[in-house]
Image (cartoon, helix red, strand yellow):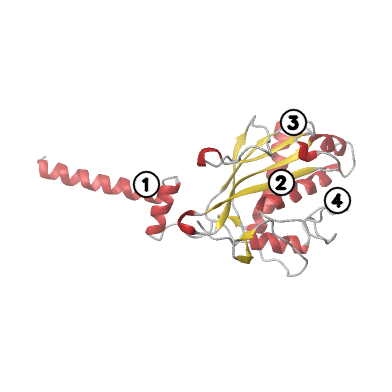
Amino acid sequence: MSERWRSGLALVISAVVLVVMVFIGPGDELAALRRVFGIGQDPLGTPADVAPGGVHAFLQTQPGHPRQPVAWDPCREIRYEVNPDGAPGDADDAVAFVQDAVEEVSALTGLQFDYVGETDRRPSWEASLVPRGRSEPVLVAWADEDEVDELSGDVAGVGGAVSQQAPAGGWRRYVTGQVTLDSDVYEQLDDERDGEARGRAILLHELGHLVGLDHVDSPAELMFADEVGLLDFGTGDRNGLVRLGKGQCA
């Protein structure tokens, strides 16, 4: 084989490797390169078609655009992990419980979630959730008020997300977050006839916060600040979740 042929073959192989990396390679740098070529800018899912009505509110809106909510990037999966310590039942039950609720939020928003496994990471609402510029997966965990002050009093759970400015001056987007459920509350619910349904409603409420919903004044919505017996999202909640699924790709 001649040197010229070997050189030409090497160039072809290098080009193929580059194309493969551009199309499927991970990382923000390659994502930016894909955007240059107009590749991969379509959302991964489609928000649900829901009936209009109800009320909803957003935790954050885009600076200078009060009608545009801060949302997750619909072109990227939301990675999440579960710490089942303190949950009723065994670890498999806890993970399945979380996955079921996440699937409902995904179906409404169109946002795609990627369960990355169990973890021993513990919730912290004081430390930065985005250390050294790298976003940790969303953490869903159980704790008590001795570990997490935010669970003090009648609080059954807390949820929220951290937003960052998108590259190249784009809109802000959520990049990580947490949901922490009160283990004492869930232990009590485990002994009640409708405890599983009520526990699921609490988790849905906190997942609503995770993807960007705020509390509302209407007791007809699950995002009402107090528990009033609702077991699923209301009409306004659903419209808010659909809106949050229509964020801008980074």
Q: How many angstroms separate mark 1 from mark 2 (CA)?
A: 36 Å
Circle number at residue 21 = 1
Q: Earlier in the sequence, mark 4 or mark 2?
A: 2
SS for tag 3?
A: loop
Q: Nearer the viewer, mark 1 or mark 2?
A: 2
**Residue 227: % across, % down:** 85, 51
Q: Earlier in the sequence, mark 4 or mark 3?
A: 3
Residue that lies at the very extreme toward the bottom in this rendered image: 52
Query: Which labelled disc corresponds to residue 243?
Result: none
The residue to which callout 2 is attached is 159
Residue 90, numbered label: 3
Q: Amino acid at mark 2?
A: Gly
Which mark's residue is nearer the viewer, 3 or 1?
1
Left or right, 8 with respect to 131, comes to left
Quadrant in the picture for residue 123: top right
Q: Which residue is mark 4?
A: 227
* Cα distance between the residues tagged 4 and 2: 15 Å
Label 2: state its secondary structure.
Answer: strand
**Which callout, 1 or 2, points at the residue further toward the start of the chain?**
1
Q: Residue at x 48, y 58 (%)?
A: 169
Q: Is residue 128 above or below residue 53?
A: above
Residue 193: image x %, image y %?
A: 90, 42
Task: Where is residue 130? Give x, y as percent.
Answer: 57, 41
- Judged left or right of residue 112, residue 142 is right
Kindly indicate whether the residue at mark 2 contacts the one at mark 3 (C-beta within 8 angstroms).
no
